[in-house]
Amino acid sequence: MGQSLRNKGLNRAQQVVVSIGWGVLLYVVASYLAIRLAMTNVFGADGWFNYAPNGATLISPEIGGGPQTAEDIVDVVAVGLWVFGSTWLFRTRTITADLVEPLD
C-alpha cells in the first residue's frame, strides 16, 4: 500500500500512459493558473499594450512585466515538473539484494 508508482513495476506502455496523463494534468493546471494570473494583474500591467488604433506608434510595457511574463513563468514551471516526473518514472531501476529471492 505504501509503494510508489515506480516500485510497482509498471511496464513501458503503462509508464507512457502515466507520463501523458501527468502532462495533461499539468497542462490543465498551468492553463488555469496562467488565466488567473493574467486576470489579477500580478506584475502591475494595465492590459492596454500595443493599442494605438489610429497611430503608427507601437506602445509596449516596461521590460520585465505584464501578463505574458506570468504565463511564461507558469509554463516553464509546468514543463519542469513534467520533465522531472517523467524522468523519475522512466529511470532504470536497479535490482538490490533484498528484492531478489534466493533460488532454493
Image (cartoon, rainbow, N blue to C red):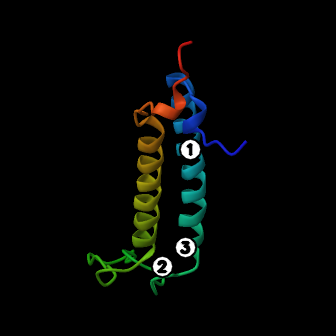
Q: Nearer the viewer, residue 98 or 39?
A: 98
Residue under the point 41% across and 55% down: 80
Q: Look at label 1 and name its amino acid.
A: Trp
Frontmost residue, 81 versus 101: 101
Q: Nearer the viewer, mark 2 or mark 1?
A: 1
User: Between 57 and 79, which is closer to the camera in this rendering?
Assistant: 79
* Mark 3 surroundings: few (<14), some (14-19) or many (≥20) residues within 10 A: some
Coordinates of residue 82 in the picture (x, y in percent):
46, 49
- The three-letter amino acid code for the residue at tag 3 is Leu
Q: Residues within 10 Å of mark 1 (few under 14, many from 20)?
A: some
- For label 1, the residue is 22
The residue type indicated by label 2 comes to Gly
**Residue pointed to by mark 2:** 47
Q: Which residue is rendered at x = 34% and y = 82% of the image?
A: 61
Compute the Cα span from label 2 to label 3: 12 Å
Q: Position of residue 15 (x, y in %)?
A: 53, 31
For the residues labelled 1 and 3, the Cα–Cα distance comes to 22 Å
Image vertical order of residue 1 relative to residue 79, above or below? above
Q: Label 2 neighbourhood size at 10 Å, few (<14), some (14-19), many (20+)?
A: few
Precedes in sequence: disc 2 or disc 1: 1
SS category of the residue bearing label 2? loop
On the image, numbered disc 3 is attached to which residue?
A: 37
Element marked by disc 3: helix
Instruction: Left or right? Give the position of 103 relative to 56.
Output: right
Q: Quadrant of the C terminus?
A: top right
Q: Residue furthest top?
A: 104
| Name of the residue lying farthest toward the right | 1
Report if the CB atoms under discs 2 and 3 are less than 8 Å apart.
no
